[in-house]
Image (cartoon, rainbow, N blue to C red):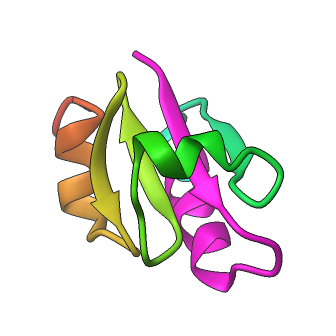
């Protein structure tokens, strides 16, 4: 599974999503869309962060921890 967080400089909500993934033990790549605008062509997000899982834009903004865990297919604890 590949998880990417589409972010912008000084995005507070992005760090919230990163912290949730860290707590879940999920590895991810952080992509600054101001440095890689081609990501905006592929994933037209209007609110950061965008959460891309296996090439599919799953969330824009901050998802609930439960929904994020479901999408990254973590076993229920």
Write the residue at 30% across / 59% down.
59
Measuring 22% from the left and 29% from the top, which residue is drawn there?
73
- Quarter occupied by residue 42: top left
Task: Tell me which segment is drawn in magenta.
Answer: 1-22
Q: Is residue 19 left or right of residue 72?
A: right
Q: Quadrant of residue 67?
A: bottom left
Q: Position of residue 52 (x, y in %)?
A: 40, 40
Q: Quick check: is 9 in the magenta stretch?
A: yes
Most extreme residue toward the top is 1
Q: Is residue 77 visible?
A: no
Quarter containing the N terminus = top left
Where does residue 8 sit, x and y in percent of width and height? 72, 69
The answer, for residue 58, to whether it is visible in the render is: yes
Q: Is residue 12 magenta?
A: yes
Q: Quadrant of residue 44?
A: bottom left
Query: Is the residue 15 above or below the residue 54 in the image?
Result: below
């Amino acid at each position: 599974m590949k998880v990417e967080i589409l972010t912008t400089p000084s995005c507070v909500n992005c760090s919230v999503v990163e912290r949730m993934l860290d707590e879940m033990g999920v590895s991810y790549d952080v992509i600054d869309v101001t440095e890689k605008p081609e990501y905006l062509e592929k994933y037209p997000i209007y609110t950061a962060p965008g959460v891309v899982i296996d090439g599919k834009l799953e969330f824009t903004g901050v998802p609930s921890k439960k929904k994020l865990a479901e999408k990254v297919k973590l076993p229920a604890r």
